[in-house]
Amino acid sequence: MTDTTRREVLGWLAGLGAAAGAGLLLPGQAGASTNVTALRDVTLIDSSGVRSNTTIVLADNEVLAVGSCDLPLPRGSTVLDLAGKFVIPGLWDMHVHGAYMDRITLPLCLANGVTGIREMWGFPPIYELRDRIERGEVLGPRLIVGSTIIDGPNSTLPDALIVSTPDEGRQAVRDAKAQGADFVKVYSFLDRATLAAVADECAMQAITFAGHCSNHVALGDASDLGQRTFEHMYGLPLATSTRETQLRQAIADLPLDPANPFAWFRQVLEFERQAALSHSGSKAAQLAKRLQRNTSALVPTMVTMRVFASPLDRFANDPRLKYMPAFYRDFWRDGLKNWAPVTEQEIRQQVEFLRRRMDQVAEMHAHGVEVLAGTDAGNPYTFPGFSLHDELELLVEAGLPPKAALKAGTRGGVVKPGEAANLVVLDGNPLKDIRNTQRIHTVLTRGKVLGPAERRQMLADVEKAAQEPFPAAARTCC
């Protein structure tokens, strides 16, 4: 990182419309049309490195300058003296459900420094919400919104868009693009021919696709087709197992009861657990090369996988439940019954399975595969905003250095002139302890400064909103 010069400061201010009258804005002058805020004497940590004694200048919602503590400022600038504080780029949660609960999800994300989210199940009201946020009508994080979930026959999701043929898959992609999706979301029951058609149509329509690794397509093969991200660590144990061929044949031979597709899905997960017991480091290295070549990334959602691997009542008294509507709490309690291990043996097996998958994520990272932080917020005991910090902690527990976990949580963000001013001010150094991302002092986004008082009020408003009546229906999360 290099200092921003005085000339550059003046030029950017002028370019942003901060020049008054016919003359160039000089230090000591400020235009009424631009709100200039300076974060002074901070330690800046982003993907380009670490820089102490730094001043970051923001003009409305844009980073104007990054330089030393004596950087020139126009008169009237709001100066936040933040000596001893640390600044990171705004956090991203790359796997979220529930943006439609705008009075819950959006403020919880912002209060926790999550200034961008990838909503993994899109439909028209969420596309409209995304656009309203961008127009400044609603305060919220940036939304990247997927299509409705595209799945094959016998899907476990009652509301998924079922495609049975390659032609139907192609039409689903065209429809998703026309409806306003930012990417196409694929799911677990797509067969190879249909997934290949979806991938080809996405390329033709210039739209990416992401989601579950299909149970019918190996992870490396799906990556070769162009799948951008793989969620939940699904497919990873099989793809790196010495028993892959045998276990894939077992999946192919597994009978499926259309009246109970979830039982089939659970058995596939059991095969994945068995696959994790026969992990091959050489196969992992080969897979990593394919993922790197195809620029495919992993979104492990360890925080949700941990819940599914735990006894039913382990998280039932989480104090953050006060921020969730009653119907969501009931939905979580009832839905988790299908997943939670019961016997001591099941609990031990699931704990070990989670640990092995986390090890594999760290191994993929060590081989250079991109890892992105996502939570699957909306699933049981996975909270918008809050759980992103839990995910960062689990990434470090898995074996990623704090610097790498922070990169995963910020999508490799760099704070530099011209970038959107999405910043989080922390009271502690996250490179020394990743849990310091939870020690938030201030969040800056969309031209607003959300200091301690504002964030407390946001959380109080969410707690109040959670007590109000909500629609009875809730979408299944995945």
Image (cartoon, rainbow, N blue to C red):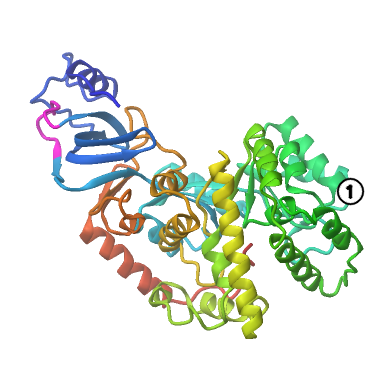
Tell me the element at label 1: loop
Residue 189, image quadrant = bottom right
Instruction: Return the residue nearer the eye: 469 or 122.
Output: 122
In the image shown, does 363 or 10 lie closer to the viewer? 363
Residue 225 locus on image (x, y percent): 76, 38
Left or right: 466 as drawn, with respect to 54 = right
Q: Is 210 positioned to the left or the right of 6 in the image?
A: right
Asked if the stretch drawn in magenta spans residue 182, the answer is no
What residue lies at 57% left-to-right and 52% top-to-bottom?
Answer: 361
**Structural crowding at the residue carrying mark 1, measured as other residues with C-alpha within 10 Å and reported as few (<14), some (14–19) or many (≥20):** some
> What span is in magenta?
69-78
Relative to 331, residue 74 above or below: above
Residue 313 x %, y %: 52, 83
The amino acid type found where label 1 is placed reads Thr
Looking at the image, which residue is at 55% across and 71% down? 307
Q: Is residue 71 magenta?
A: yes
User: Quick check: 276 left or right of 20?
Assistant: right
Q: Main secondary structure of the magenta part?
A: loop
Please give the name of the residue rendered at 51% of the width and 73% of the height, measured from the top-left corner. Answer: 470
Measuring from the top left, give residue 298's x and y in whole percent. 59, 48
Position in image of residue 207 (x %, y %): 66, 36
Q: Give the answer, above or below, for where 143 lies relative to 315.
A: above
Residue 10 visible in image = yes
> Quadrant where the C terminus lies?
bottom right
Q: Where 26 falls versus 243 (above or below)?
A: above
Residue 180 seen: no
**How many numbered badges does the structure rendering display?**
1
Residue at which label 1 appears: 165
Q: Which residue lies furthest to the bottom in this view?
A: 343
